[in-house]
Structures are given as C-alpha cells and as structure tokens.
Amino acid sequence: MSDTPENSPADVSSTARCWALIPCAGSGSRAGLDHPKQYQSLAGRPMVLHTLAAFAAVRRISGILVVVAAGDSFFSIHKGDYRVADCGGATRAESVANGLNILREQGASGSDWVLVHDAARCLITPAQINLLMDACAADPVGGLLALPLADTLKCVLDARVMATLQRHDKWLAQTPQMFRIDLLRRALGHAGPEMTDESSAVESIGLQPLVVNGSAQNFKVTYPEDFALAQALLQGRSAGGDDSDNRWTTVGEGR
Ligand code: CTP
Ligand code: MG
C-alpha cells in the first residue's frame, strides 16, 4: 500500500496542536449503579473530574472537549477548563466520531492530534499522557498506551477452558490513544460504530499504531468492585503516598 497523506512522514508537523477528547456519554451498565459511573464520587469528587484534572495539568494540550449524552446536565454545575458537547452517540465510537466533528467545527485542523481518553479511566496521570505525546509526536500513524498481559490467557466456553493462547505478544489496550483528527475520522467512518477503541479503527484502514507502555493503575472502572480500588489509589495519591507526578488537584486553572 502506498503511503496515504496521513501516513507520510512529511505530514508530521511540529506546529500541529494537540486536543483531548473525553467520551463521557456511557450509562455504565456493568457498574451496577443507578447513575452513570463517571459521576460516582471517588475520593471526594466525581470520577470524571479526576480524569479531567490530569489532562488540565498537561499544558501543551490546546483544549479539552467532553462528550456527554443529550440532556446530561452534570457539567452545568461542574464548570472548568474544558468544553462540553451533548453529542453522545449510541456507542463509544459514535460519541468519539461526533466529538471529532465538533473539534473540527470549533477550529481544530484535520492534521492536529487528538488524545481520546475514557472518562472512566480516572487514574490516568499527566506523566503517562506526556509519555504518549512524546512517543507519538514524530510518528506517522500515532499510538496508544497499552499493558503487556501478565496472566495466562484462556478461551472459555460454558465455563470450560477450550484453549490456552500464547500471551507473549498480547497487550491490553488502554487510553489515551493519540491520532491525527482527520485520519481518525476517516478510520472511524470505515470501521463503523462497534469499534471499542480508536486503534481498532485505525488498524482497519491498514495502519499499525505505536504501542507505548502504560500503567496497571490506568484501568477502566467497569465493575462494582473497581470503585473501591480506584478510590484507594486516588486517596493514596492525595495523601502523598505517590507524589511522582500527582501534584495536580485543580480543574479549571488557565493553561
Ligand atoms: N462512552 C460514550 N458513549 C457511549 C458509550 C460509552 O461516551 N455510547 C464512554 C463512557 O462514558 C466511558 C468510555 O466511553 O467513559 C468507555 O466506555 P465503557 O467503560 O464501556 O463505559 P460504559 O459504556 O458507560 O459502560 P458499560 O459498557 O458497562 O455500559
Ligand atoms: Mg460500554
């Protein structure tokens, strides 16, 4: 395959800006709450505000867009250094695609970068965001944080192990995932609404995203038992137990 314009090294421009897009329009059906999990209070504030604080602390991000479901009024009383669009879709991929259109309408260039990050990964740190940005800045495709698989991987049917898979080349995809805005719009349009991450969409158009080592702490709060673990880790950070890159607490400071 010949290089697409987006896949050409010539396209890598040092003047490109970088935006953050936070899909926040899910219902959290696996979490067992009576409200969307991203608004559950953890260590003193709603989960998504921890997520947003990490991005707000990365000064080279030009702006943050949060995508919520239509009629969601959470951010009318939680204002900060981010924009909110109530253009959430039926799937995560649709929410992301709609958010990318809003970024473009609001002045982002198609060759600007976007960091897409799950609202429900509230343990992301500025250091991990910076790590991904540094790794992808000169990359022709873009990339994602991911974690090498630690456990043995089984195929299971009706509670019976059918096979054991090789794990040496298996990684768990995390977010943020960083791609050029128009490349990602094209990829999502090609891949359809069921893709559960941006990398899958970009892979579907024949590209190979860069994998950058993430952290086990950057898990996605999904099941009921995840909340206690996330809260304990957040409390540990605010108590100073892990101060390596966690000296950010305020959403809404100017950048
Ligand atoms: N998300 C979204 N729009 C959707 C579905 C999900 O913006 N239609 C967001 C969620 O708010 C979350 C992120 O995508 O921050 C990752 O999705 P997931 O963890 O699956 O959250 P939910 O879809 O809300 O949870 P569940 O799958 O358990 O219903
Ligand atoms: Mg979901």
Image: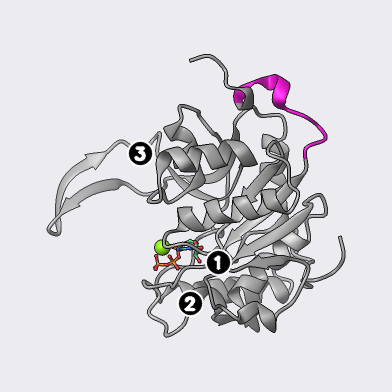
Among the two numbered marks 2 and 1 on one chain, the one whose residue lies closer to the N terminus: 1
C-alpha span from label 2 to label 1: 9 Å
Q: Which residue is mark 2?
A: 36
- Give amino acid for label 1: Cys
* Range drawn in magenta: 7-16
Identify the image quadrant of the C terminus.
Answer: bottom right
State yes or no: Cβ of the residue under disc 1 lies below 8 Å from any atom of ligand 1.
yes
* In the depicted structure, whether residue 165 falls above or below residue 160: above
Quadrant of res 240:
bottom right
Q: Which residue is mark 3?
A: 167
Q: Residue at x 46, y 58 (%)?
A: 92
Q: Categorize mark 3 by other alpha carbons within 10 Å: few (<14), some (14-19), many (20+).
A: some
Q: Residue at x 50, y 38 (%)?
A: 187
Give the x, y percent position of residue 15: 82, 35
* In the depicted structure, whether residue 251 falls above or below residue 154: below
Q: Residue at x 68, y 36 (%)?
A: 135
Task: Tell which tag, 2 or 3, sits nearer the viewer.
Answer: 2
Left or right of 74? Residue 204 is left
- Give amino acid for label 2: Pro
Task: Tell which tag, 1 or 3, sits nearer the viewer.
Answer: 1
Question: At numbered mark 1, what does the secondary structure look like: helix, strand or loop?
Answer: loop
Name the colour scheme: one colour
Q: Categorize mark 2 by other alpha carbons within 10 Å: few (<14), some (14-19), many (20+).
A: some
* In the depicted structure, whether residue 171 falls above or below residue 103: above
Q: Which residue is mark 1?
A: 24
Report if the CB atoms under discs 1 and 3 are less than 8 Å apart: no
